[in-house]
Image (tube, rainbow, N blue to C red):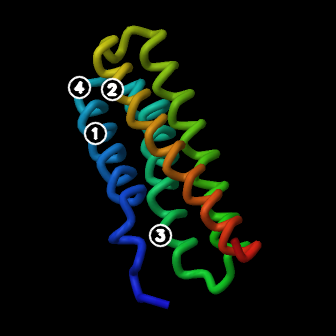
């Protein structure tokens, strides 16, 4: 197995970009939001990145799939935080739409990755 193979994966690179974009969007928020929902969205979006990386080092498809599932769950959590920021008028509609599109894209990539792993596992 190639060491640090996750760095070549588009889903990893897109997850890194999402994390960076979220971090930048949080900077202008009032302190009380940065320390509550800001901390939560930072953790959830970083969890996506870290679980993709950690899963890539596992020796079985089953284990990798488990980490991809955790990444998907963290993406949903990230979107819920984005929804909260938007509902409270802390991010613009434009930023909201951009984040939603990024999250949809990463979800699709993870879903496709999981499908490909199922095919490999079943020998197709």
Q: Nearer the viewer, mark 1 or mark 2?
A: 2
Between disc 4 and disc 1, the foreground one is 1
Q: Residue placed at 51% from the left, 19% from the top? A: 84
Q: What's the mark number on residue 53?
A: 3
Q: Which residue is mark 1?
A: 21
Q: Earlier in the sequence, mark 3 or mark 4?
A: 4
Vertical arrangement, residue 2 with respect to residue 44, above or below: below
**Residue 53: horizontal and vertical position, in percent?**
47, 70
Q: Quadrant of residue 76?
A: top right
Q: Where is residue 77, by image quadrant?
A: top right
- Alpha carbon of mark 1 to alpha carbon of mark 2: how far? 10 Å
Q: What residue do we see at 54% from left, 52% from top?
A: 110
Lower position in the chain sequence, tag 3 or tag 2: 3
Residue denoted by label 4 = 28
Q: Mark 4 Cα within 10 Å, few/some/many (few <14, many 20+)?
A: few
Q: For mark 3, give the secondary structure.
A: helix
Point 30% across, 21% down: residue: 95
* Disc sitting over residue 98 in the figure: 2
């Amino acid at each position: 197995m190639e060491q640090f193979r996750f760095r070549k994966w588009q889903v990893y690179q897109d997850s890194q970009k999402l994390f960076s974009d979220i971090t930048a969007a949080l900077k202008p928020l009032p302190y009380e939001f940065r320390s509550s929902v800001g901390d939560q969205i930072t953790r959830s979006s970083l969890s996506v990145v870290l679980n993709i990386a950690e899963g890539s080092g596992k020796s079985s498809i089953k284990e990798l799939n488990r980490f991809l599932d955790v990444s998907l769950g963290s993406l949903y959590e990230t979107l819920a935080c984005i929804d909260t920021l938007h509902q409270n008028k802390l991010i613009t509609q434009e930023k909201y739409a951009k984040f939603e599109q990024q999250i949809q894209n990463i979800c699709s990539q993870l879903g496709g990755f999981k499908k490909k792993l199922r095919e490999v596992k079943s020998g197709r």
